[in-house]
Image: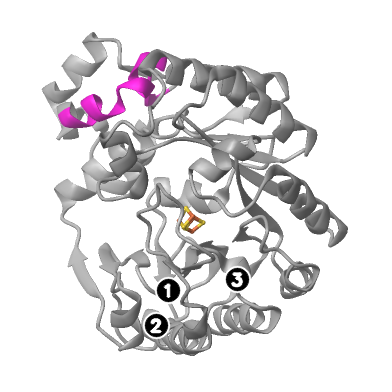
């Protein structure tokens, strides 16, 4: 982290991330830093993050920002005064550029008109809704607290408050989910006219309730080829509705790709605030305490400098998520050497195996490579 309180000399504006680690209840698949039934701690948490934002803005030299992301957890569990206080603190500590992308994640069933209006008034211009699936049986099974009617109601609340830039998160590969279920979810999502859709395959994390239920045979995951079929359905359906796939899981209408995430995948510096938030700034990665109590008790973050070799690998690991891949020219500007010079023979196997390809001066994953991204990364390590 840059020390001192001088004005930042960063050329490119940074991203700002704020983590809200509170949820109504814990979803069965979730291993994110989120806490159910801790709403009583929200006022104390807001005080702590407002202090952190001011302190770190000063330390970093108040760099300009052009993306802001309130994520969670469930930011829509805050009330309108709390969220406004946090946004005011961010805008007070960092000059946020005109036209910046300012996103707030929300969960259906927690979104109120007062909250959305407060977001609009404070300058938030993009909402991301965790919609997940159109079938109540699947939503219940994964522990979501809402049904699809509440997704529709939340979109309505958002539109009435003037929000047109909406992302919907959808999930596939859920236990007992069929390709027909997922097609129904995609179709239902399309009727809500989002500008952006993120489709995530379920990752079964150790220690989660869903993992235990799968282990004892209470829940059964779809076969691998069914899961692949669902992913293909997403690609086809979204393409038919004018969405462009710009990342493994992300699809956007023209001009609506998430600039905050694009910044993270291209190693634009960002500062993250709150429990479990990460930052990348001044070639250092900083991790705030992942436990809420430790964060509230003022435990110090951990900071590691990223070595040049790690930085080159990160550029590939993050950049290959994007369908456009990693431009050789950008890589050389960032690392002082081209991709071929940095990775040499390590490129031969994934290129020869049809997992990576050169396209218009960029190295990108092929369609097969997208399915086998981890094996490409192992080759490049
Ligand atoms: S809403 Fe999101 S963060 Fe909260 S428990 Fe569910 S998956 Fe986890």
Between 324 and 191, the one lying in front of the other is 191
Region in magenta: 361-378
For marks 1 and 2, give the one nearer the viewer.
1
Left or right of 143 on screen, residue 150: right
The stretch drawn in magenta includes residue 376: yes
Q: Circle 3 — which element?
A: helix
Q: Are marks 1 and 2 in contact (CB under 8 Å)?
A: yes
The residue wearing badge 3 is 77
Where residue 360 sits in the image (x, y, percent)?
45, 21
The answer to whether mark 2 and mark 3 are in CB contact below 8 A is no
* Above or below, 357 relative to 154: above
Q: Residues within 10 Å of mark 2 (few under 14, many from 20)?
A: many
Per the image, is 277 magenta? no
Q: Earlier in the sequence, mark 2 or mark 3?
A: 2
Label 2 and label 3: CA atoms lie apart by: 25 Å
69 relative to 159, above or below = below
Asked if the residue at tag 1 contacts the one at tag 3, i.e. Cβ–Cβ closer than 8 Å, the answer is no
Q: Which mark is residue 273?
A: 1
| Residue shown at 36% from the left, 18% from the top | 358
């Amino acid at each position: 982290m840059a020390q001192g309180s001088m004005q930042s000399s960063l050329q490119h504006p940074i991203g700002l991330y704020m983590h809200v680690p509170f949820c109504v209840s814990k979803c069965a698949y979730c291993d994110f830093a989120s806490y159910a039934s801790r709403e009583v701690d929200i006022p104390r948490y807001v005080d702590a993050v407002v202090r952190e934002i001011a302190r770190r803005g000063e330390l970093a030299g108040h760099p300009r920002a052009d993306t802001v992301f309130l994520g969670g957890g469930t930011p829509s569990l805050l009330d309108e005064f709390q969220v406004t206080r946090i946004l005011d603190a961010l805008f007070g500590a960092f000059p946020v550029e005109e036209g910046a992308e300012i996103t707030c994640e929300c969960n259906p069933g927690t979104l109120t008109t007062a909250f959305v209006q407060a977001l609009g008034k404070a300058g938030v211009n993009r909402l991301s809704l965790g919609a997940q699936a159109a079938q109540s049986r699947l939503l219940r099974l994964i522990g979501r607290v809402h049904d699809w009617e509440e997704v529709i109601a939340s979109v309505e609340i958002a539109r009435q408050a003037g929000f047109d830039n909406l992302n919907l998160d959808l999930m596939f590969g859920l236990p007992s989910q069929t390709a027909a279920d997922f097609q129904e979810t995609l179709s239902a999502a399309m009727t809500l006219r989002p500008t952006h859709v993120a489709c995530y395959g379920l990752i079964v994390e150790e220690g989660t309730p869903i993992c235990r239920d799968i282990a004892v045979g209470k829940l059964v995951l779809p076969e691998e080829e069914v899961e692949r079929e669902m992913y293909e359905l997403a690609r086809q359906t979204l393409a038919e509705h004018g969405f462009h796939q710009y990342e493994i899981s992300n699809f956007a209408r023209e001009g609506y790709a998430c600039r905050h995430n694009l910044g993270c995948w291209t190693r634009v510096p960002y500062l993250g605030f709150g429990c479990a938030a990460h930052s990348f700034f001044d070639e250092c990665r900083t991790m705030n305490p992942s436990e809420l109590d430790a964060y509230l008790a003022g435990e110090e973050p951990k900071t590691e400098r990223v070595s040049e070799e790690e930085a080159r690998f990160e550029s590939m690991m993050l950049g290959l998520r994007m369908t456009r891949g990693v431009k050789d020219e950008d890589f050389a500007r960032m690392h002082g050497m081209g991709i071929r010079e940095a990775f040499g023979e390590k490129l031969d196997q994934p290129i020869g195996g049809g997992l990576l390809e050169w396209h218009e001066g960029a190295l990108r994953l092929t369609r097969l490579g997208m399915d086998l991204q981890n094996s490409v990364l192992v080759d490049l390590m």
